[in-house]
Image (cartoon, rainbow, N blue to C red):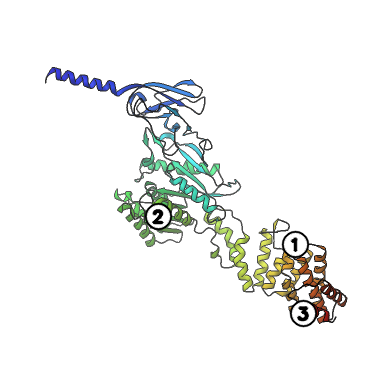
């Protein structure tokens, strides 16, 4: 070869090297005065992704800088000396590498926080972010997101949902569903704590496929130890949990759920497995056979298993979902609630819809009031069921009793009505609109319940009590608005003296008190009409009857009860 040609090639190579490298100053603004900052990236000048090799210089309290010879394009991140303390520049989720395409690229960066000590409020988040150290997983720990219910109360017990791939949007979707479904006015699921697990990176590589090891080898079992021995005990210690845990997994996470279910000390009571598969089967791990046996032999607390697959996903995933369903149907177990759904979606787009359905499925037995055929069923089993199923210390509600009350009244079950009224009073389920305090039903409401149950004597006893409780526990409008029931009840019992006595007392009360703004005039005319006509018909309380007749004449106005000539002709 011509020596001149060789020399030319060497010169061109050296020229390329010279023009490929340049000295670049990189600056970073830090959140704390005491922050030591390391830069690490894709070339030797950055330490080849060693997180504690290249330290930046402190220029001022909040500024760090370094001048370095780079080859473009350059990729890098900032740390405090290890991969657990990665600097967050843009977003918490999938915190991207920073890039310099040329010497003209932006060279000043602002760190919002460190991944092992993030302030959710400072980042504008409505959930907490913590770093949980670990003796098991790669990198020495995992970052977790903690979304508490809006009205979190440490005196209450809460179920906990865990979700892998917590750096993805799946966490936000699950969080929004749980908040919306539990909140007013729906309340179709209980308030729930949501924990997102961020897999992060170690030595510049993602931990995700190592944590969610679909063959359940060394790193997969290490992640299981992190879940069972560190994360769940930590959440139980820090927050008020009910013991009902659910794991949500998508793709690798759905496959990984097989192995968690098979563990003897499995702390989960439910799985949402979205786009699952059986890689373990193809690697002679016989995971499918073991799952079938586990379904058949399970004898623990009620368990919920939800599988979702997409019709536009890979064939093996669709087949795995079908196989799951077949395994369960072949080994049906009343202790396990199972459901498999197939969606007209692809691998990722099925997540939002299936998450909603999965949450509803896991909570399918929450507040299922139609399950309790009678009031006695509800009284004796509801609280125990909610505790056994979900670990909830839930309260009775008067709204739950409405259908039972209507059934009792329609079918004239007086003894059951007695028990229901006592139950409401014992548990203070009805808020009195006069006292504005929870307690039992007031006497007027009780009277109406008995009246419509055809227990007329008990109804009249309550109506008499109601008069004595006017404006104390009984609303004036309710008492006088239902007065026809009182009149009809006493007439059925032929107790006319008691009726007129109560009419007189009620008239005198309405004379001295404003019952309602526009109703006193009509009410007083009606009460006096009743007193006058009953006095005449049954030859009782003549003095009061004549007084009432004169009132009707003097205060007469057009009404539906009588006309003036009829009243003048009434003989008392």
Q: Which of marks 2 and 1 is in front?
A: 1
Q: Distance between the Cα atoms at labels 3 and 2?
A: 67 Å
Q: Which of marks 3 and 2 is in front?
A: 3
Q: Is mark 1 on a helix, strand or loop?
A: loop
Q: Nearer the viewer, residue 310 or 164?
A: 310
Q: Residues within 10 Å of mark 2 (few under 14, many from 20)?
A: many
Q: Name the residue under label 3.
A: 494
Residue 290 spot, x, y in % from top left: 36, 53
- The numbered mark, 3 or 1, whose residue comes first in the sequence reads 3
Residue 42 spot, x, y in % from top left: 34, 29
Q: Mark 2 points at which residue?
A: 307
**Figure check: 198 above or below 269:** above
Q: Nearer the viewer, residue 553 or 427?
A: 553
Total residue callouts: 3
- The numbered mark, 3 or 2, whose residue comes first in the sequence reads 2
- The numbered mark, 2 or 1, whose residue comes first in the sequence reads 2
Q: Residues within 10 Å of mark 3 (few under 14, many from 20)?
A: few
Q: Can residue 498 be seen in this view?
A: no
Residue 322 spot, x, y in % from top left: 35, 58
Q: Which of 567 and 502 is in front in this view?
A: 567
Q: Do the residues labelled 3 and 2 touch (CB within 8 Å)?
A: no
């Amino acid at each position: 070869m011509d020596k001149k040609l060789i020399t030319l090639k060497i010169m061109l190579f050296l020229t390329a090297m010279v023009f490929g490298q340049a000295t670049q100053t990189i600056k970073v603004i830090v959140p704390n005065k005491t922050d030591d900052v390391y830069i690490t990236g894709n070339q030797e000048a950055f330490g080849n992704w060693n997180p504690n090799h290249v330290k930046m210089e402190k220029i001022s309290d909040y500024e760090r800088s370094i001048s370095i010879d780079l080859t473009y394009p350059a990729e890098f991140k900032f740390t405090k000396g290890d991969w657990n303390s990665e600097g967050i520049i843009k977003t918490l989720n999938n915190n991207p590498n920073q890039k310099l395409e040329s010497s003209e690229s932006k060279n000043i960066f602002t760190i919002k926080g460190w991944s092992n000590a993030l302030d959710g409020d400072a980042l504008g988040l409505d959930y907490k972010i913590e770093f949980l150290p670990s003796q098991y997983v790669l990198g020495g720990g995992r970052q977790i997101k903690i979304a508490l219910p809006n009205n979190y109360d440490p005196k209450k017990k809460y179920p906990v949902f865990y979700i892998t791939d917590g750096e993805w949007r799946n966490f936000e979707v699950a969080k929004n569903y749980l908040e919306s479904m539990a909140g007013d006015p729906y309340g179709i699921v209980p308030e729930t704590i949501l924990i997102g697990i961020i897999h992060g990176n170690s030595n510049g590589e993602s931990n995700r496929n190592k944590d969610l090891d679909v063959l359940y080898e060394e790193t997969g079992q290490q992640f299981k130890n992190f879940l069972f021995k560190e994360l769940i005990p930590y959440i139980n210690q820090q927050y008020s949990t009910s013991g009902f845990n659910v794991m949500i997994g998508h793709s690798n996470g759905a496959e990984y759920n097989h192995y968690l279910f098979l563990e003897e000390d499995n702390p989960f009571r439910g799985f949402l497995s979205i786009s699952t598969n059986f890689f373990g089967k193809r690697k002679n791990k016989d995971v499918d056979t073991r799952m079938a046996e586990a379904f058949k032999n399970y004898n623990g607390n009620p368990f919920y298993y939800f599988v979702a697959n997409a019709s536009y996903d890979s064939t093996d995933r669709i087949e795995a979902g079908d196989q799951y369903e077949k395994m369960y149907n072949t080994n049906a177990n009343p202790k396990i609630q199972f459901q498999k759904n197939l969606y007209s979606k692809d691998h990722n787009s099925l997540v939002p819809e299936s998450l909603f359905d999965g949450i509803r499925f896991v909570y399918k037995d929450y507040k299922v009031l139609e399950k309790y055929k009678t009031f006695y069923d509800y009284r004796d089993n509801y609280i125990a069921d909610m505790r056994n199923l979900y670990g909830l210390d839930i309260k009775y509600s008067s709204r739950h009793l409405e259908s039972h009350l209507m059934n009792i009244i329609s079918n004239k079950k007086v003894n059951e009505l007695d028990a229901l009224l006592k139950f409401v009073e014992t548990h203070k389920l009805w808020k009195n609109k006069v006292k504005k305090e929870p307690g039992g039903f007031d006497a007027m409401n009780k009277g109406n319940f008995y009246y419509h149950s055809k227990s007329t004597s008990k109804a009249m006893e309550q109506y008499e009590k109601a008069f004595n409780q006017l404006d104390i526990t009984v609303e004036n409008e309710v008492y006088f608005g239902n007065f026809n029931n009182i009149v009809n009840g006493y007439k059925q019992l032929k107790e006319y003296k008691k009726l007129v006595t109560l009419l007189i007392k009620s008239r005198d009360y309405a004379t001295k008190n404003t019952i309602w703004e526009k109703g006193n005039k009509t009410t007083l005319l009606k009460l006096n009409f009743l007193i006058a006509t009953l006095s005449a018909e049954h030859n009782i309380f003549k003095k009061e009857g004549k007084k009432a007749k004169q009132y009707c004449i003097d205060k007469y106005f057009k009404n539906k009860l009588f006309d003036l000539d009829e009243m003048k002709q009434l003989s008392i």
